Image: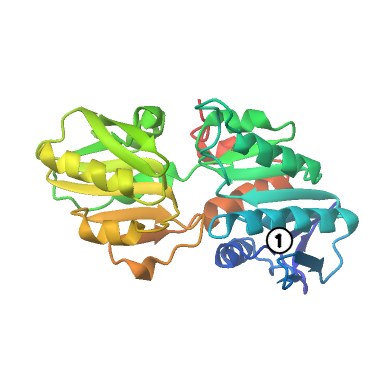
Amino acid sequence: MADSTCCVTSPRKRLMIFSGRSNPALAARIADKLDVQLGSVELKTFANGEIYARFEENVRGSDMFIVQSPCDSINDELMELLIMIQAAQLASAKRITAVMPYYPYSRQDKKSAAREPISARLVATLLEASKVDRVLSMDLHQGQIQGFFEIPVDHMTAVPMLADYFRYKDFGGTPLVAVSADAGGVKLAKRFINRIPGCDLAVLTKMRPDHNVAETMHFIGDVRDKIAIIVDDIIDTAGSITSAIETLYDNGAKEVYVTATHGIFSGPAFDRIRSSEVKEVVVTDTVHVEAASCDKVKVLSVADILARTIRNVFEDESVSEIFAGDNQLF
């Protein structure tokens, strides 16, 4: 039930959706699913790099959702989100929710060596300092990130949607096996196979000698003459993925597919995917993906998942019921 402007009204509150510059196409799809117009906001960057934000319509008393997935220009886009939140605060929005399908710095969630930061915790601190009321994110890299916050964090997952894509794909009766990209992703892979009857599980282990460098070390499971689907949460430079693809073919896999929620595809990622023997790489639009850059990449939209979650938050309904409990990280 839309009015003539950009919000859904109720006797108690208004739902308004705004977008930062990181992924406006996703924000527009979410607004369309909610049958609202995307709110108007002026965003610009000055010559010295400073970011400016001003909402171009009245947001007083609204239940505001700001969609931003800092990724391509991660630091600028994170700062832009913080500035938009403060602008909304000063404009007297009643409740402000940061919709961050991809959580920046999520891989820096613990200290792996002396004198390192826990940057994912710092991002949580910055968001709370901006006075945001709650955060919506999807397929966090690790569950402890939720514990970094003292405000509500609603966790969503694209795993059921990705699993259903392969469940209904015609493989001609060839058995499937889901392959966890590393030991830490086993629970993610188990949630994946729960949606696909008869799908087996295998595990790869890897060592990282340096940042964005991975070497597949060991393989546990049976992929011989099967369709192997590597399941991960993030694909960045695709180094570990291409190494895993080679390992699976070496172990007799008939075909290898890859799926992940967040397709960052930085640096040489597309070149590595193109030159690999992978059949298809399936990701979502939590971050902006130039799928046309590689014909092996397919992008599924999470707009419907996000729209339903936003609707339930707005109406004070359960978020976990949308996912039948599959959005729990532990």
Residue drawn where x is 58% and y is 35% of the image: 320
**Residue 294, relative to residue 191: is it above or below?**
below
Q: How many callouts does the rendering have?
A: 1
Q: Position of residue 147 (x, y in %)?
A: 64, 28
Q: Residue furthest front?
A: 115
> Left or right: 113 with respect to 263?
right
Is residue 244 or residue 217 the one in the foreground?
217
Q: Position of residue 62 (x, y in %)?
A: 83, 56
* One can see residue 166 in this view: yes
Q: Quadrant of the N terminus?
A: bottom right
* One can see residue 196 in this view: no
Label 1: how many Cα within 10 Å (few below 14, some 14–19, many 20+): many
Name the residue type under label 1.
Ile
Q: Position of residue 117 (x, y in %)?
A: 61, 33
Is residue 326 or residue 105 the one in the foreground?
105
Q: Position of residue 149 (x, y in %)?
A: 70, 33
> Left or right: 168 with respect to 174?
right
SS under mark 1: strand
Residue drawn where x is 32% and y is 37% of the image: 181
Is residue 9 or residue 125 the one in the foreground?
125
> Left or right: 158 with respect to 170?
right
Task: Name the residue tied to disc 1.
Answer: 17
Residue drawn where x is 39% and y is 47% of the image: 260
Colour scheme shown: rainbow
